[in-house]
């Protein structure tokens, strides 16, 4: 029987050294029936020239988006391109994701076969550089469904609700139904929304013995209260996109929690933020209130 094909999608922007390490580890995977699609958000650091020899591998394909579309736009571009190529599965990750376990992909493919493709997506276990869990890549577990599928635990498969686009293994049968990630998110929340959309068609799972390392500079998920001054503007997308996702998929308790957190953030910015308090408040307000009306387009295949 012919082995299943995997299209591995890596979105990058101005991190050529990290990207090179990412690609080298992907090429070293024990599961060989994969092609690697590099989606470059118009890097200006000579990314393409730096990885030219890897592109010549015939397993690595390079695409320049022509402009910085953010992570959301990059994954939208990558999933669209990969679906044209007819892969059985897609494996999504950022350029600072290092598949240092050579069996990370094989384990995902094996679990997909065990599940007989009855899943929307699988999430690998994402570690940080110290070997512990990466804080921003911890899935949300399915609190209501896990007890119905507890027999899968001994197979190291756990039901979840959402994950991130770091070792995100998608079933293309479900991608065809769900459509593409929302490019208008730019950054933040695109993976959260996509998980909830895919979950409408089939159960997602975490595979706890498929490991990658996410080489973030700091192992934290800093809010607008603590984030560095140069990253404050990026938080706008986070709060705007949250508003859309909660309006579309959230329950009453989620909407109440969003209101509570808004006031909590305002208070903490005023009391705890070390600098740029007015800028932080302006960004929070802009994102929060625009999230009430933000209505991006979901592109179908």
Image: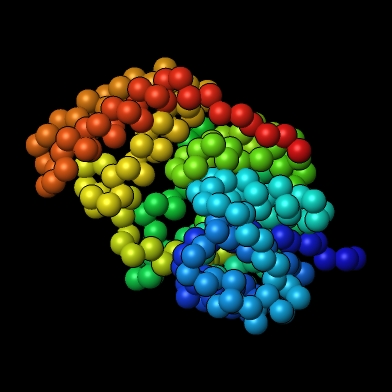
Quadrant assignment, res 278 = top left
Which residue is at the front of the view, 108 or 115?
Answer: 108
Q: Locate the N terminus by quadrant.
A: bottom right
Q: Position of residue 92 (x, y in %)?
A: 60, 56
Q: Position of residue 276 (x, y in %)?
A: 16, 43
Which residue is at the front of the view, 124 or 76?
Answer: 76
Q: On screen, 270 above or below 31?
A: above
Quadrant assignment, res 32 = bottom right
User: Could you tell me which residue is drawn at 31 percent across and 55 percent down?
Assistant: 220
Q: On screen, 131 above or below 148?
A: below
Residue 77, can we see it?
Answer: yes
User: Could you tell me which residue is drawn at 29 percent across and 34 percent down?
Assistant: 283
Q: Which residue is outermost to the top?
A: 252
Q: Which residue is outermost to the bottom?
A: 53
Q: Which residue is outermost to the left?
A: 271
Residue 164 in the figure: left or right of residue 229: right
Q: On screen, 133 above or below 67?
A: below
Q: On screen, 14 above or below 194?
A: below
Which residue is at the front of the view, 44 or 208?
Answer: 44
């Amino acid at each position: 029987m012919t082995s299943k094909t995997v299209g591995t999608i890596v979105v990058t922007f101005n991190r050529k050294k990290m990207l090179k390490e990412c690609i080298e580890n992907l090429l070293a995977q024990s599961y060989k029936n994969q092609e690697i699609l590099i989606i470059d958000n118009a890097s200006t650091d000579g990314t393409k020239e730096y990885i030219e020899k890897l592109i010549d591998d015939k397993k690595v394909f390079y695409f320049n988006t022509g402009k910085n579309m953010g992570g959301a736009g990059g994954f939208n571009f990558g999933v669209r391109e990969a679906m044209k190529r007819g892969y059985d599965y897609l494996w999504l990750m950022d350029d600072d994701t290092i598949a240092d376990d050579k069996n990370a992909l094989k384990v995902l493919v094996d679990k997909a076969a065990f599940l007989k493709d009855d899943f929307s997506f699988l999430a690998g276990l994402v570690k940080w550089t110290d070997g512990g869990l990466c804080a921003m890549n911890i899935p949300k577990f399915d609190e209501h469904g896990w007890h119905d599928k507890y027999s899968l635990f001994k197979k190291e498969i756990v039901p979840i609700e959402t994950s991130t686009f770091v070792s995100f293994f998608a079933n293309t049968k479900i991608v065809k139904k769900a459509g593409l990630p929302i490019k208008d998110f730019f950054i933040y929340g695109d993976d959260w929304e996509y998980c909830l959309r895919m979950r409408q068609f089939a159960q997602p799972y975490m595979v706890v013995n498929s490991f990658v390392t996410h080489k973030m500079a700091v192992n934290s998920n800093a809010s607008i209260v603590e984030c560095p001054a140069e990253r404050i503007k990026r938080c706008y997308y986070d709060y705007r996109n949250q508003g859309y996702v909660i309006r579309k998929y959230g329950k009453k308790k989620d909407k109440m929690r969003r209101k509570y957190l808004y006031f909590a953030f305002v208070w903490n910015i005023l009391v705890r933020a070390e600098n740029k308090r007015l800028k932080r408040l302006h960004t929070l307000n802009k994102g929060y209130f625009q999230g009430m009306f933000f209505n991006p387009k979901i592109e179908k295949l």
